[in-house]
Image (tube, rainbow, N blue to C red):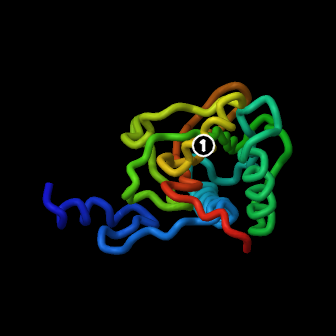
Amino acid sequence: MSRAAAGLLCLPAAGCASFGEPTRPVHPVDGVRKVVDSLGEEIGTRAAAEPFRGLPIVIRTTTAANSGIEPIIAELLRTRLAERGLPVDAVCAPRCLEISLQELAVEAAKATPLSAGQLLSVAGGHVPVVGGLIRTIGEQEREKEHAAGRANGLFVTLAARDGNRYGARAHLVAIISAGEIALERR
């Protein structure tokens, strides 16, 4: 594939780094902020469209323990959505838009076109870049050591629930960090 064709494929993805410019390391706090901004916009857009229109929003994490980045992003996202005037509930009543967050880590090339805050659609349940693993609590520390060669993010499920039945579902991958991470003091 030519460089121009690869560039054209990259254009539709929000936040895609160009081939010519080197990506600067992102501070982890900036990555979280960008993910909350991107997800807040995406959830707001989807909440205004069918089949999610008018449903109260419930955000849940998939880990049993309150460790990792999932609960932090969930809290910030609840606040962001409430500030936008969207209905955010603590638990799913008979009907809701349920947002599930699951942390993940994947192998990423050093010159990856992924960037913090980027959202990737999951068409048909397949994400080409997600060839890695879903992170468990015990693996989180080990994953930190390999962060320079990894992309970290969230697997996000948006589901229209009516009782115990799902009327519609959609999936996204939200990139928190990719490649080098800047850990200098701010």
Residue sitting at 38 percent across and 49 percent down?
109
Residue sitting at 74 percent across and 68 percent down?
84
Q: In which quadrant of the rendered image does the N terminus lie?
A: bottom left
Mark 1, residues whose alpha carbon is within 10 Å: few (<14), some, or many (≥20)? few
Q: Which residue is at the far right?
A: 90
Q: Which residue is mark 1?
A: 145
Which quadrant of the structure image shows residue 5?
bottom left
Q: In which quadrant of the rendered image does the C terminus lie?
A: bottom right
Residue sitting at 60 percent across and 43 percent down?
145
Q: How far from the left and from the top, in percent, is residue 80?
A: 75, 64
Which quadrant of the structure image shows residue 65?
top right
Vertical order, 25 against 178 (above or below): below
Compare residues 94 and 9 and report the one nearer the observer: 9
Q: How far from the left and from the top, in percent, is residue 171?
A: 52, 42
Name the side, left or right, on which 68 lies relative to 26: right
Q: Which residue is at the far top?
A: 164
Vertical order, 63 against 173 (above or below): above
Q: How many marks?
A: 1
Q: How far from the left and from the top, in percent, is residue 39?
A: 61, 58
Q: Secondary structure at mark 1?
A: helix
Q: How far from the left and from the top, in percent, is residue 92?
A: 79, 38
